[in-house]
């Protein structure tokens, strides 16, 4: 995975990240199982009886799941070099899943986020930056600016990875004994910081020449 290129333990870190994405996708399936109402929805109380809120929530779950599933392979340059057609297809899916489903619905749901204004602010920030970086990546490839496309999409998918990062921090802080609401807010902002660090540290290595992107790989990055 491009984020960990030239970092000790690249293969292990890449595998852990891919596994975390898979676990998020499996975990999201609970919302469509038709069984007992998941805890997250139980906590929302009356909002779950609002059809507009519920539709927004399910659009977000689907959009976020699709963006993770489509975006993960695109962060492996070796794979994109071998499968340029699939790169374009998955990039198209990722672009639309983020811009028209996951990011805008996340902004709407931020208003009812657990943890009050601090959580709302965090989700709004993440949603806006996720949308903006994805749009910037699309605009860059439209004008054939491949380096700008790579930079934007590295940042975009780092925001997508804030979801599994959030779960990791939340589990760690739970084990540490932090109360539920404080844990939620802290995990959110830690995942935001992790997303920024992940993308920017990768881009710094690229700018310094520590990570080499062949023209063919840059042309299909998304």
Image: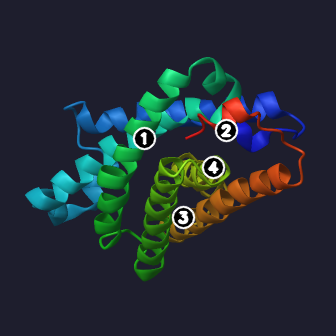
Q: Nearer the viewer, mark 4 or mark 3?
A: 4
Pointer 3 local density, CA inside 10 Å: few below 14, some 14–19, many at least 20: many
Q: What is the CA distance from the residue labelled 2 to the residue labelled 1?
A: 17 Å
Q: Residue 212 placed where, x, y %?
A: 83, 39
- Residue identifier under label 2: 218
Q: What is the CA distance from the residue labelled 2 to the residue labelled 4?
A: 11 Å
Q: Nearer the viewer, residue 218 or 108?
A: 218
Mark 2 touches mark 4? (CB < 8 Å): no
The dot on residue 154 is: 4
- Name of the residue lying farthest toward the front: 143
Secondary structure type for disc 1: helix
Residue at the image point whose x is 42% and y is 72% from the top: 124
Secondary structure type for disc 4: helix
Question: Is tag 1's residue or tag 4's residue first in the polypeptide sequence?
Answer: 1
Residue at the image point whose x is 57% and y is 49% from the top: 153
The dot on residue 188 is: 3
Among the 4 quarters of the image, the one containing residue 7: top right
């Amino acid at each position: 995975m491009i984020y960990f290129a030239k970092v000790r333990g690249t293969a292990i870190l890449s595998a852990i990240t891919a596994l975390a994405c898979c676990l998020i996708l499996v975990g999201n399936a609970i919302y469509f199982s038709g069984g007992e109402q998941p805890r997250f929805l139980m906590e929302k109380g009356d909002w779950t009886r609002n059809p507009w809120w519920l539709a927004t929530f399910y659009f977000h779950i689907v959009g976020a799941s699709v963006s993770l599933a489509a975006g993960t392979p695109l962060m492996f340059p070796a794979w994109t070099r071998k499968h340029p057609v699939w790169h374009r297809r998955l990039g198209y899916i990722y672009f639309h899943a983020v811009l028209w489903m996951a990011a805008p619905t996340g902004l709407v749901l931020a208003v009812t986020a657990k943890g009050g204004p601090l959580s709302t602010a965090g989700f709004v920030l993440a949603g806006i930056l996720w949308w903006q970086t994805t749009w910037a990546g699309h605009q860059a490839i439209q004008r054939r600016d491949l380096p700008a496309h790579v930079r934007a999409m590295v940042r975009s998918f780092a925001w997508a990875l804030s979801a599994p990062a959030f779960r990791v921090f939340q589990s760690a802080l739970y084990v540490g004994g932090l109360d539920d609401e404080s844990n939620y807010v802290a995990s959110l902002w830690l995942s935001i910081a992790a997303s920024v660090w992940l993308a920017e540290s990768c881009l710094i290595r690229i700018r310094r020449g520590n990570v080499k992107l062949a023209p063919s790989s840059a042309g299909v990055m998304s």
